[in-house]
Amino acid sequence: MKIVVLNGSPKGNLSSTLQYVRFMEKKLPGNSFLVFNIAHDIRKIETDETIFRGIIDGMKDADCILWAFPLYYFLVAAQYKRFIELLWERGVEEVFKNKYTAALSTSIHLFDHMAHNYIHAICDDLEMKFLGSYSADTFDLLKEPEQKRFLQFSKHLLEGIKNGVSTAREFPSLQPNEFQYEPGDQGQPVDPGGRQVLILSDCESGQTNLVHMIEKLKNSFVGGAKVVNLYNITIKGGCLGCIRCGYDNTCVYEGKDEFTTFFRETVEKAPIIIFAGTIRDRYLSSRWKLFFDRSFFCNHIPYLMGKQIGFLISGPLSQIPNLSQIFEGYVEVKKGSLAGIVTDECRNSSQIDTFIEGLAQRLAQYADSGYVKPSTFLGVGCNKIFRDNIYGRLRFPFQADHAYYRKSGAYDFPQKDFKARVISAFLIFLTKIPAMRKEIYNKKIMEEMVKPLRKLVDKTP
């Protein structure tokens, strides 16, 4: 079989994900593997039509197309995202139709399901036959049981292609919104208390809804807001995954473009930030992805801590719950407070006006009171994964993170709660006695669990 591998790592042949592909190739002889380093070569692919067409031609007689990628900020790298955009821009969707496909990723299992949902949905939009995803820890291949598991996946993939198995579409087609938003009379603007309001966007010509939504939100604040178009920021390239920033948060692009200076002086200093964008395929634009990827020079330090965050989205967001969860997860992981998301989906200009004015009110009110929404599993779970990995195997490459985590108290391991450990040990000992176990579990446990909370409430004036 001919398997075409679309390598989504900016590291090219030095990709960890690609080593899984090479392992598959060695373990399954008799199959040909053609690898295209998509993310690494994206500039050539984008600017040289001959190179792009060579990749497309290479896929025409493929039995399987394998999307292989590392995770970059909840998704694939910006360079890979740009290639996916090119498929529609250059009208080559037909090449992918009815071809068998699968996804392979490497990461520390941080929101990996979101990246796989995205790729799966893209494959559905291309009318491909999706045969499954495999999400590996970066170093799983070093473990014999994981080698066996990955080989099983690989064999099942090839067997499915050989047998011509049928697949069902999982992600429905997106229904476009042709509605034109026209803002009405401006209501009473809210006072952000002298705080700077920053609106970041990727507006391009023709995106009138987003332009009007941004203008409406800007005018909803006393003193307006600072609006920055990401296309006006000089960004030389996407994140390379080189981890140069891991030592002291200095990006390899430092001094070569405007991004890190802009981020430190504008984004990090703004107490209220609104991200504004138009949905493109199943995400925002690759320019937005470039912004998030390049912010990784901050590593895993929560640079939105205490900030009030909002989103203005033009497009069918309600049809892409995966993207909504990406927005929520991003804000929680960075310890910001999500005040709300406004879209143009309701197709009613006056209603959109009230939604935008309401978002402005919440952003200002939350900022005034210092209210930060509590994290859900998205933030709590993610930060525990960061905590454990930075304390352990990632301590060396991410030394700046380790220093921050120690100083900020992020190393909040529950094992250090000696009082809880002693109490638990004593109670476990008591439950070894049948009569005590019956007394505790049948009569006491529910009352004792609520007791400290009830005590606090009873004392509250």
Image (cartoon, rainbow, N blue to C red):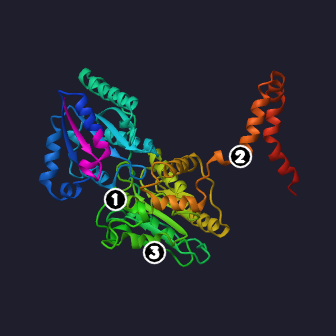
- Percent of width and height locating residue 108: 44, 45
Q: Are marks 2 and 1 in contact (CB under 8 Å)?
A: no
Q: The C terminus lies in which quarter of the figure?
A: bottom right
Asked if residue 99 shows in the view, the reply is no
Q: Are marks 1 and 3 in contact (CB under 8 Å)?
A: no
Q: Position of residue 157 (x, y in %)?
A: 30, 28
Which residue is drawn at the image coordinates 20% and 51% (left, top)?
90
Q: Secondary structure at mark 1?
A: loop
Q: Nearer the viewer, mark 2 or mark 3?
A: 2
Identified at 35% across, 36% down, the residue is: 141
User: What amino acid is found at the position of numbered circle 2 in the picture?
Assistant: Phe
Residue 438 visible? The answer is yes
Residue 392 counted in the magenta span:
no
Q: Which residues are magenta?
A: 1-19
Residue at coordinates 46% horizontally, 56% vertically from top-left?
A: 344
For the residue pair 101 and 14, the one nearer the viewer reads as: 14
In this image, 278 relative to 420: left or right?
A: left
Q: Secondary structure at mark 3?
A: helix
Dividing the picture into quadrants, the one containing residue 441 is top right
Q: CA distance from mark 1 to mark 3?
A: 20 Å
Report the Cα–Cα distance between label 2 and label 1: 42 Å
Q: Amino acid at mark 3?
A: Glu
Which mark is first along the chain, 3 or 2?
A: 3
Decide which of tag 1 and tag 3 comes sooner along the chain: 1
Residue type at mark 1? Cys
User: Which numbered disc covers residue 265?
Assistant: 3
Which residue is labeled 1 in the image? 239
Q: Which residue is mark 2?
A: 418
